Image (cartoon, helix red, strand yellow):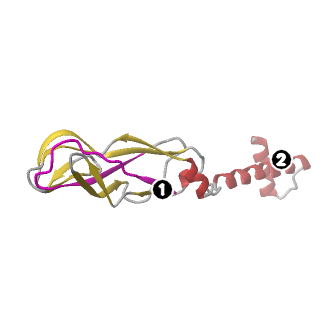
Amino acid sequence: MYDLFAVIEHNRNVMLPLPANHAVITSLLLTVLLCSHETSAAPPPPKAACNAALQAALVTNLNFGDYEGTVAGAITVDTAGTRTTTAPILAGGIVSSAAYDVWTTLSGCEKRNITITLPASVTLAGPASMTANNFTKNPANKFKLTAPGAPTRVTVGATLNSTAGQAGGSYTTTFNVDFTH
């Protein structure tokens, strides 16, 4: 390699023609460099293929914890898992935001934006019913993955609305979190 570059440098300064075998080597070297550049700038796969390769796994559930619902109010768990309230007395329990690991199995899809879609509200069932709404997400906007197989953590929070004298017991529901390109 060193001799080839020395000949090319010498040729440029003195303007002598290269021997035939050097011209072929130079041509091959330039072709390889050009092809390598084109490959790194390849567009991502089609959205449909990226959506099919997109994976998400629930890591933790959204938990509002325990509280005493003698008066109406709202309990909010933010995307960091911090709980605040407007009226019910908080009494402990497990508190967490929902967490999902999101990744792709198809190379190139990490170049595409991912959108998170959350429900407007859901109804929890138990001894009575309760509504959760005002869902939030982190990241708050579109995001990109870092590499195929490398998960990105997404967290979700919401507000639970309690009525005065809410019946004690366990309240549960499921809700959809959609990840799409």
Sooner in the amino-acid sequence: mark 1 or mark 2: 2
Crowding at mark 2 (Cα within 10 Å: few <14, some 14-19, many 20+): few
Q: Is residue 88 left or right of residue 29?
A: left
Of residue 16 and residue 77, the one placed in the foreground of this image is: 77
- How many marks are shown on the rendered structure? 2
Which residue type does callout 1 highlight? Answer: Ile
The answer to which image quadrant residue 95 occupies is top left
The residue under the point 49% across, 41% down is 150
Q: Position of residue 163 (x, y in %)?
A: 15, 56
* Range drawn in magenta: 153-181
Which residue type does callout 2 highlight? Answer: Ile
Q: Position of residue 98 (x, y in %)?
A: 33, 46
Crowding at mark 1 (Cα within 10 Å: few <14, some 14-19, many 20+): many
Of residue 58 and residue 167, the one placed in the foreground of this image is: 167
Q: Is residue 166 left or right of residue 57?
A: left
Q: Position of residue 181 (x, y in %)?
A: 52, 57
The quadrant of the image that shows the N terminus is top right
Within the magenta stretch, is there residue 84?
no
Q: Which residue is mark 2?
A: 25
Q: CA distance from mark 1 to mark 2?
A: 45 Å
Tell me the SS state at disc 2.
helix
Task: State the mark number for residue 23.
Answer: none
Do labels 1 and 2 touch, CB within 8 Å? no
Of residue 18 and residue 52, the one placed in the foreground of this image is: 52
The residue under the point 22% across, 42% down is 170
Task: State the mark number for residue 114.
Answer: 1
The residue under the point 12% across, 56% down is 72
Q: Is residue 79 left or right of residue 168?
A: right
The residue under the point 83% across, 59% down is 15
